Image: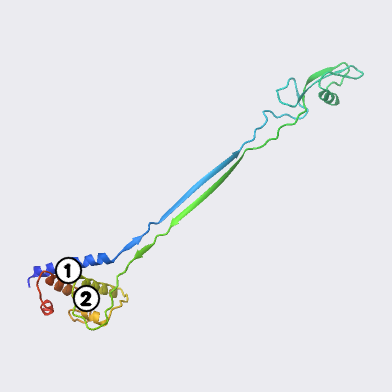
Amino acid sequence: MKLWRKLLAAVTAGTICLGSIGAMLSVSAETELDSSAVSENSTEVKVSKGAHTHYYGELANSSDGCSGWYFYCVGNNGVNYDMMGDSIADKYAINNGFVPNALDTASGWVWLGTNPPTITTTKVTTKTTTKTTTKTTTTTTQPSVPTVKEGSLDKGDIDGSGSLDSTDVFYSMLYIANTAVGNTVKISKEQVTAADVDESSSVDATDVYYLMYYIALHGVGVNVSWDNVLAK
């Protein structure tokens, strides 16, 4: 048989086989996300403060409008005091010696009030951090060779369907790939014998080639026997 027909047969069977593999393998994965959401809330408490701060007993020529100033006007006539201002302020002036000498007069303003409390501004900050992680999950569907145990199988008919097609090629390739990496494949002795089309006592790429070649020839109407395909 001419070389081009062998090549055409191999390419045809290979295309069919790849289509089967693609249909039987599926992989799904979720995307991993790692995000951080930060929210910050601030509450600021403000308390008004007095416009002026004075000390008790402070003297001034005039009031600045703050509540707490008292006007005093005291005269010393040498015998007693004349009080002409606010009585509280006048007594404070006398008790503190604002007019110590006879015939002296003193007047003005004295702070006898209470200063407003000094309250500092307080800022309360609440910070919340939220971290969300989505774990990646990968699922792989691994095809397996269906086990056929009853009776003997025709050469190349690995799935026991009674006909040779791309499914048999696929199972042959799957068996070879798994055994090459040390995976255990559940397959019967009859299936191994059917896959060993060249009867070399091992299933390898040569068996796949002959199986693909046989299927391709029959696919284009060339009904050759196994003896013709395996003839050297």
In this view of the protein, which residue sits in the foreground, 65 or 29? 29
From the viewer's perspective, tell me whether residue 228 is left or right of residue 122. Answer: left
**Rendering quarter of residue 152:** bottom left
Of tags 1 and 2, the one toward the viewer is 2
The structure residue drawn at horizontal position 59% and vertical position 43%, both measured from the top left corner, is 124
Sequence order check, earlier mark of 1 and 2: 1
Secondary structure of the residue carrying tag 1 is helix
The structure residue drawn at horizontal position 70% and vertical position 23%, both measured from the top left corner, is 65
The structure residue drawn at horizontal position 46% and vertical position 51%, both measured from the top left corner, is 36
For badge 1, the amino acid type reads Ala
Instruction: Pinpoint residue 205: horizontal percent, then vertical percent.
Output: 20, 74
| Vertical comparison of 193 with 25: above or below | below
For badge 2, the amino acid type reads Ser
Instruction: Pinpoint residue 154: horizontal percent, then vertical percent.
Output: 19, 80
Which residue is most to the right?
79
Instruction: Pinpoint residue 142: horizontal percent, then vertical percent.
Output: 31, 69
Q: Residues within 10 Å of mark 1 (few under 14, many from 20)?
A: many
Residue labelled with disc 2: 161
From the viewer's perspective, tell me whether residue 97 is left or right of residue 200. Answer: right
Give the CA distance from mark 1 to mark 2.
Answer: 18 Å
**Rendering quarter of residue 93:** top right
Residue labelled with disc 1: 13
Instruction: Pinpoint residue 186: horizontal percent, then vertical percent.
Output: 30, 78
